[in-house]
Image (cartoon, rainbow, N blue to C red):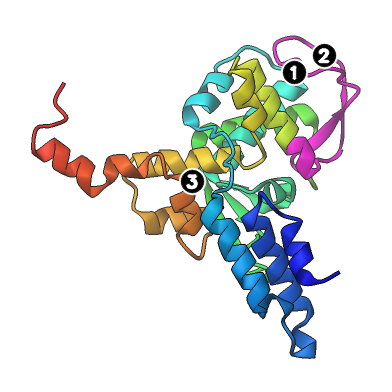
Amino acid sequence: MPLIQVVLAFPNDPSGAWRLGHALKELTAAQLFNPCASEAVQMEVRGMTNELSSRQGQARALGMAEIQAFLNSPGENFPTLRERAMLCVAYDAMARRSELIAIDVEDLKFLADGTGRLLIRRSKTDQAGEGHIAYLSRQTVRHLQAWLKRGGIKDGAVFRRIIGRGTVTYNRHGKGRIGGRLSPEAVARAFKAVAKYLKMPVDEVEQVSGHSIRVGATQDLLALNIDLASVMQAGRWKTNRMPMRYGEHVMPARGAMARAAKEQGRDTE
C-alpha cells in the first residue's frame, strides 16, 4: 500500500500519522530511504494538522487533595491498605505505573527519622538502568509499612494482586489472599476504583488512568511555585515538554499576565 494511503487512514489523528511516520523512518533507515520524506506525505500531514488539532487528551489528575480524602476514609482491609500505600508512593515518587509495579521490598529504605527512600532502578528516561533515588514522606512510610505488615510481604514485589477479593470494597472486611506482582492495567483499575469510591463524576472517573497521580503531583508542585527544574528532576524528565503539558491549567496563574493583574489591582475581589 502506498504510504500516502496509510497516512490517509488517520483522518482524525494527525498525531497518530506523525507517530507512524517516525516508526517507518526508523524501519527504513537501514535502506537509506525514508518514505515519509515524500512531498505528498508531508503535504497531507501538514494539511491534517491545519484542519485538526493534534492536541492529545490528558488523564484526570489525582492530586494530594484526592489522595488525602481516600487516606481519611474508613477501612483496614487488603484493598484499602494496598491502595493507600500505592497512592502515596506513586505521588512521592511521581512514579509511572511501570515504575510502580517494578518496586521490590529491597528497593525501599526506611530511615530513623521516619522518612524513606525508594530506588527506582529503571525508568522510561533511564533505559541504561542508572537508577534514581526518590524521597518518601513519613505519611507514605506509615502506609507502606502497614501494607507490607498486613500482607506479610518481606521481599519481592511490593504491590501485588489480591486474589479472591470479589468486587472492590474499601470500607468492609473482605476475604482474599496476596498474589503476584500487579500488572500495569491493574494500577489503572485501582486508581479508577479510588476515584469512583470518592464519588467523582462518572465522566471524570473514565478519564482516570495509571498516569493520574503523576499528573496530579506535577500540578501540585507547580501550584506551590516549585521551580520547573526541580519538578523535572522529581519526575525524571529530560525535557520540560510533559511537565508543562501536565501543568497547563496551573501555569497561567503563575504567568506574566496573572502577575501583572495582581500588581495592577485587577484581581482584587
- Upstream in sequence: badge 1 or badge 3: 1
- Upstream in sequence: badge 1 or badge 2: 1
Residue bearing mark 3: 246
Question: Is residue 135 toward the left or the right of residue 125 in the image?
Answer: left
The amino acid at mark 1 is: Asn
- Residue 128 inside the magenta-drawn segment: no
Q: How many marks?
A: 3
Q: Secondary structure at mark 3?
A: helix
Q: CA distance from mark 1 to mark 2?
A: 7 Å
Q: Residue at x 57, y 38 (%)?
A: 213
Where does residue 240 sit, x and y in percent of width and height?
45, 60
Where does residue 135 sit, x and y in percent of width and height?
51, 48
Residue bearing mark 2: 174
Mark 1: few, some, or many residues within 10 Å (few <14, many ≥20)?
some
Tell me, yes or no, whether the two marked residues, 1 and 2, touch with CB atoms within 8 Å: yes
The quarter of the picture where the C terminus appears is top left
The amino acid at mark 2 is: Gly
Q: Secondary structure at mark 1?
A: loop
Mark 3: few, some, or many residues within 10 Å (few <14, many ≥20)?
many
Q: CA distance from mark 1 to mark 3?
A: 33 Å
Q: Secondary structure at mark 2?
A: loop
Q: Residue at x 75, y 23 (%)?
A: 79
Residue bearing mark 1: 77
61 and 144: which one is in front?
A: 61
Tell me, yes or no, whether the two marked residues, 1 and 3, touch with CB atoms within 8 Å: no
The amino acid at mark 3 is: Tyr
The magenta segment: 158-187
**Extreme residue toward the top, this view:** 172
- Upstream in sequence: badge 2 or badge 3: 2
